[in-house]
Image (tube, rainbow, N blue to C red):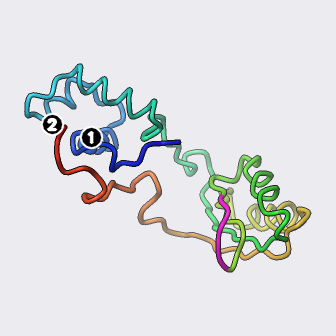
Amino acid sequence: MPKTMSENDIIDRKIVELLMDDGRMAAAEIARNIGGGISERVVRYRINRMIDDKVIQIRPIVNPQAFGLTTRADVVLEVESDAIMEVARKAMEYECVSYAACSIGEMDVSIQVVGRDTAEIYRFVTEVIGKMPGVRKTTTSIVPIVLKDVYQWRIPHDAVVKKVG
């Protein structure tokens, strides 16, 4: 189970913010940016600790549009109660599904689908997702503009320990 960010401190937060701006930034450059006598060795240790504790992951972020997948849709599914996890897990197996989650509320499963055009998304939702055992209903919203994506989320200032330690 990942540690919560409140178990980390403001130095960890600064390291994460710098890595979010440039995931290839060297530990020495991060140390210089932070200042305050933080060494490259300390930065490397903290990065490795946060990776081991599953606080962060360092990996490339793929732009689906660069591969011709220019259309994105949010699809919410109403599913029979005994099939929610099975449907969610099955949905995540498809390459065109970029996100899958179980929901609490009016709908049971939420997925994001990428495709070349609306026709491709329509076919996938109606012929694949809509025909999965347990799926009662699908509601699809085409997403023409994304202003902030999940990888752009920043750690709230009050989510970390204020005291450096």
Q: Magenta: predominant secondary structure element? A: loop
Crowdedness near tag 2: few (<14), some (14–19) or many (≥20) residues, C-alpha within 10 Å: some
* Quadrant into which the C terminus falls: top left
Q: Going 23% across and 19% down the picture, which residue do you hit?
A: 41
Magenta span covers which residues? 101-105
Q: Which residue is mark 1?
A: 18
Q: Going 88% across and 67% down the picture, which residue do you hit?
A: 134
Residue 139 position in % (x across, y down) = 72, 76
Q: Point out which mark residue 81 bears.
A: none
Give left or right: position of 76 versus 1. Answer: right
Say if the magenta span includes residue 79. Answer: no
C-alpha span from label 1 to label 2:
9 Å
Quarter residue 122 falls in: bottom right
Residue that extends furthest to the left in the rendered view of this protein? 36
Say if the magenta span includes residue 102. Answer: yes
Residues 13 and 137: in front is 13
Q: Which residue is mark 2?
A: 34
All told, the count of numbered labels is 2
